[in-house]
Amino acid sequence: MATRITYKFKNQAKEINFAYDKYHDIYEAVAAAEGVDLTRYLMMEQQIAMTSKGSSAVKDFRAKEFARFGFSDIYYHKDEPKKS
């Protein structure tokens, strides 16, 4: 089953193919497509995950950081196979 990601990077709409065997999540995929280095982001995300009690802190951090990087409207689309 094919999957795609649509997103905006610096207000320019883009679309890429996505596979979990290449990337951990859709955020890593869009960052790689635009050449954004996530080394420091991933370290900070891990620290937040270890110190926070819920996943909302990690989600909030991710949303704010990717907005700061210039990303918006990141969506995952699953293409259903056509029935004949």
Image: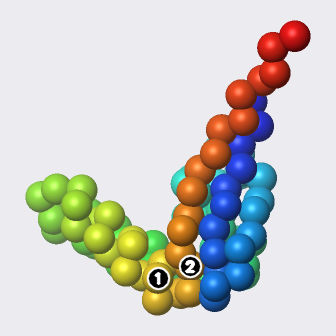
Quadrant placement of the C terminus = top right
| 1 up-or-down from 24: above or below | above
Neighbor class of circle 1 (other Cα within 10 Å; few <14, some 14-19, many 20+) is some
Q: Position of residue 8 (x, y in %)?
A: 64, 75
Q: Are marks 1 and 2 in contact (CB under 8 Å)?
A: yes
Three-letter amino acid code at the position of disc 1: Ala
Seen at 12% across and 58% down, the residue is 53
Say what secondary structure mark 1 lies in.
helix
Q: Position of residue 83 (x, y in %)?
A: 81, 14
Q: Quadrant of residue 80?
A: top right
Say what secondary structure mark 2 lies in.
strand
Three-letter amino acid code at the position of disc 2: Phe
> Alpha-carbon distance for marks 1 and 2?
5 Å
Q: Residue furthest left?
A: 53
Seen at 22% across and 61% down, the residue is 56
The residue beneath circle 1 is: 67
Q: In the drawing, does residue 58 fall left or right of residue 26?
A: left
Seen at 42% across and 82% down, the residue is 65
Q: Position of residue 2 (x, y in %)?
A: 76, 37
Q: Position of residue 11 (x, y in %)?
A: 64, 85
Comparing 59 with 4, the one in front is 4
Comparing 12 with 47, the one in front is 12
Q: How is the image coloured?
A: rainbow
Q: In the drawing, does residue 32 fall left or right of residue 54?
A: right
Q: Residue furthest right?
A: 84
The residue beneath circle 2 is: 71
Neighbor class of circle 2 (other Cα within 10 Å; few <14, some 14-19, many 20+) is many
Comparing 24 with 77, the one in front is 77
Give the label on residue 53, or none: none
